[in-house]
Image (cartoon, rainbow, N blue to C red):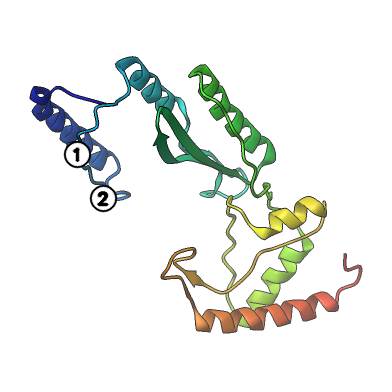
Amino acid sequence: MSLEPDAEPAFRAAAEQELAALREQHKGFDDELVLGIERVTEIDAAGESATALVLDLVAAIPTGVIAMSPELLGTVETSTSVTVATSERDALTLASMTRSSNARALEDAVATIAAAARLAGADVEIARSYPPWRPDLDSRLLATARTTFERLFGVEPALAVVHGGLECAVIGAKLPGVEMISIGPEILGPHAPGERLSISGTQRFYRLLGALLDALSRQTEIR
């Protein structure tokens, strides 16, 4: 956007006021939110109508948690977020990441985003990634893993469901009906330069893996 020089103070005041409101709204979740305003010499800018259209589109695109899991309280089933906005010449590109453990819910969320884009006159490109992997809380494999964990460590394991991409989702899409769980040692700061692996957690994991394979080998009708 562009402003007349005498409108800058009012704009800065309005922007700081909006920033303060956002900090208060997301207090405790995103306290490090900052705002930067810089003068530039570039004279090309989107017109008022195009700017209004983009703002309406951003407001219409869903972002955040869409649905919680009906099976595990407090677990997110479906979410989406606008992750990146880039501009090149006269084109603006908005990228959203949408994830779900429910295939139908994932399609519904993607369809909503695509509909908003079409109403704004934007082109839509859908890039597929990991397929959904819906948890099977009644699987024999999961039950065996839980009892094995309790026997080894004397406590119940913490069961977590993630709606992000996991290799199990890819395997499950190719082998319908196969029972799977995802287990591993504690990882701190994954997918970042400071990623670390817990040595003691890795030791516990190998104990669990060996005991689980032993328990499964003793069961009949292994599928």
Q: How far across and down, in percent of the image, does residue 131 sit?
A: 68, 47
Indicate the secondary structure of the residue bearing disc 1: loop
- For the point 63% across and 36% down, the residue is 105
**Please, which residue is most extreme toward the top here?**
49
State whether residue 130 is above or below residue 47.
below
Are the residues tagged 2 and 1 within 8 Å (C-beta)? no
Q: Nearer the viewer, residue 69 or 150?
A: 69
Q: Is residue 138 visible?
A: no
The residue wearing badge 1 is 37
Q: How far across and down, in percent of the image, does residue 178 sit?
A: 81, 57
- For the point 11% across and 23% down, the residue is 7
> Which image quadrant is residue 144 in?
bottom right
Q: Nearer the viewer, residue 111 or 3?
A: 3
> Which image quadrant is residue 104 in?
top right
Q: Is residue 196 visible?
A: yes
The residue wearing badge 2 is 31
**Please, which residue is most extreme toward the right here?**
221
State whether residue 154 is above or below residue 39.
below
Q: Amino acid at mark 2?
A: Asp
**Callout 2: 10 Å neighbours few (<14), some, many (20+)?**
few
Q: Amino acid at mark 1?
A: Ile
- For the point 59% across and 62% down, the residue is 159
